[in-house]
Image (cartoon, grey):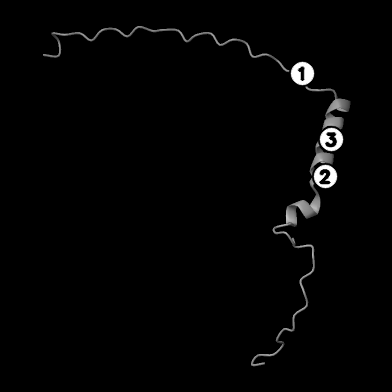
Amino acid sequence: MGGLFRAPKPVIVPPPAAPAPAVALPPPPEQAGQQAQAEARTRAAHGLPGTIATSDRGVLVPLPQVARKSLLGE
């Protein structure tokens, strides 16, 4: 019975034309360098204390000296 019915021929639809991407010009080297320096200054402004401080005391403040055991069994 395969000869009684024919499958319809597929309709070929061309893909839509993609719009041309806009070409963005890179910033001039002087401006790129200034922008990199500004970002570095911003990161440096946060500083080490801002990344280490985990409590009101922080890690940079030394711990109080407490007598500690030096040998097992003391």
Q: Which corner quadrant of the image does residue 71 belong to?
A: bottom right
The x, y position of residue 31, in whole percent, is 86, 26
Closer to the chain start, of discs 3 and 2, is 3
In this view, 7 is above or below 27: above
Query: In the displayed structure, does residue 47 sit left or right of residue 18?
Result: right
The x, y position of residue 34, in whole percent, is 87, 31
In this view, 52 is above or below 69: above
**Which type of secondary structure does the marked residue at label 1 adopt?**
loop
Residue farthest right in this picture: 30
Q: Which mark is residue 38?
A: 3
The amino acid marked with disc number 1 is Leu
The amino acid marked with disc number 2 is Ala
- Which is nearer the eye, 4 or 38? 38
The answer to whether marks 2 and 1 mark residues whose Cβ atoms lie closer than 8 Å is: no
The x, y position of residue 4, in whole percent, is 13, 8
Q: Which corner quadrant of the image does residue 60 belong to?
A: bottom right
Residue farthest left in this picture: 1
- Give the residue at x 84% y 40%: 41
- Give the residue at x 23% y 10%: 7
**Mark 1 lies on residue:** 25
